[in-house]
Image: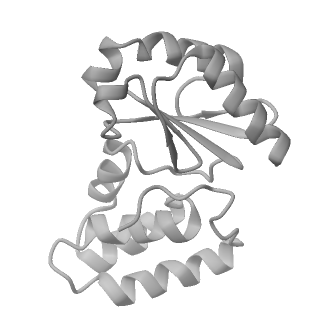
Amino acid sequence: MTAVRNASTAPACAPADASAVVRQVLAQRAGEPGALLPILHDLQDALGHVPAQSLAAIADALNLSRAEVHGVVTYYHHFRAEPAARHVVQICRAEACQAMGADALVAHAQQHLGCAMHGTSKDGAFTLEPVFCLGLCASSPAMMLDDQPHARMTPQAFDALLADAGSAA
């Protein structure tokens, strides 16, 4: 599976189209052993999120309860139940990044964007999400903006990246 797709590149699907995508993914994957995570990844990649209305169909196809599917979707930070904003900001929350100042970066990001983790900025341009290890531990703290990694982040570098992204939108 691919990494989290930037919401601006994910297809915008109307509810009827989303149902068709869910049916297609289930037809392709439901018979595979351990199909739940691949199905959820495929839906997130295709739709930019895992629609709540798809959980019952997934559960039925895999002979699971809706609660089991919901539990997996909500357990993993990667999955989102609502579409993300045009830009997705993911700040690493793993130990190396925390040791190098990620908590201060998160606080700055939340203040700058005016939203908490898993939230969207008031202008609807940025979604803020945690991510757990981007593999840039030696260059902490790290973040991704629209699937592009950035290392040795400071509040000033964060502000400059978001200003560039906002002006490019």
The front one of 128 and 60 is 128
Residue 128, percent across and down? 57, 33
Task: Give percent across and percent down for residue 52.
Answer: 51, 58
Q: Quadrant of residue 58?
A: bottom left
In this image, 150 relative to 68: left or right?
Answer: right
Please tell me whether residue 167 is drawn above or below residue 17 in the rendered image.
above
Visible residue check, residue 124: no
Residue lying at 49% horizontally and 49% vertically, measured from the top left: 80
What's the residue at 47%, 84% (across, down)?
Answer: 23
For residue 111, say whether it is visible.
yes
Q: Is residue 13 above or below residue 32?
A: above
| 76 left or right, relative to 5 | left
Report the number of discs.
0
In the picture, residue 34 is in which quadrant?
Answer: bottom left
Residue 73 sits above or below residue 47 on the image: above
Instruction: Name the residue at 69% across, 58% down.
Output: 8
- The quarter of the displayed image where residue 126 is located: top right
Identify the image's colour scheme: rainbow, by chain, secondary structure or one colour: one colour
In this rendered view, identify the residue nearer to me: 105 or 135. 135
Residue at the image position 51 percent from the left and 23 percent from the top: 153
Residue 97 appears at what percent x and percent y?
34, 22
Q: Residue furthest left?
A: 33
Q: Quadrant of the N terminus?
A: bottom left
Left or right, residue 6 beside residue 14: left
